[in-house]
Amino acid sequence: MMPVDTIHDILSAVVKIFGNQDTSWNSMKKFIAQKGVIEQIVNFDSRSLNKDVRQNLNAFINSKKASFEKQNAYRASNAAGPLAEWVVAILKLSVVLESIAPLEN
């Protein structure tokens, strides 16, 4: 797998989390170039992921498993590794938050 493919796969997952289904390089470059994008990522509310988005992302990640393997992601770039881990963590946290939501009320 080429590092460029890995980076594309990881960025595709990130933009999908934020509701953008356009995973072209131009769209992803626009997303990354936004002012405050790091803060958006850091402050992302996992509760905002609905079940359909989560299922689609899980299917996408499963189809691109090699890109989300820690060693491959970090080999692709210093930024791709943490982003890949963030995507996986956000999906897991979303499931946990959904399961405990009834207990919070």
Image: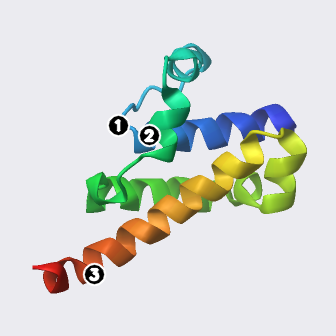
Measured from the top left, where is residue 56 in percent x and y? 40, 54
Q: Return the mark for residue 73.
A: none
Is 74 rendered above or below residue 62?
A: above
Residue that sits furthest to the bottom in the current view: 103
Is 65 rendered above or below residue 28?
A: below
Mark 2 and mark 1 in contact? Answer it, CB < 8 Å: yes
Q: Which residue is mark 2?
A: 16
Residue that sits furthest to the left in the current view: 105
Q: Which residue is mark 1?
A: 19
Mark 3 or 1, closer to the camera: 3
Mark 1 closeness class: few <14, some 14–19, many ≥20 residues within 10 Å: few
Q: Which residue is mark 3?
A: 99
Three-letter amino acid code of the residue under disc 1: Gly
Reading the chain from its start, which is encountered first: label 3 or label 1? 1
Please tell me which residue is depicted at 90% across the width and 46% down the height of the picture.
75
Asked which secondary structure carries label 2, the reply is: helix
Residue 60 appears left or right of 20? right
The answer to whether one can see residue 1 in this image is no
Marks 2 and 3 sit apart, C-alpha to C-alpha, by 22 Å
Three-letter amino acid code of the residue under disc 3: Ser
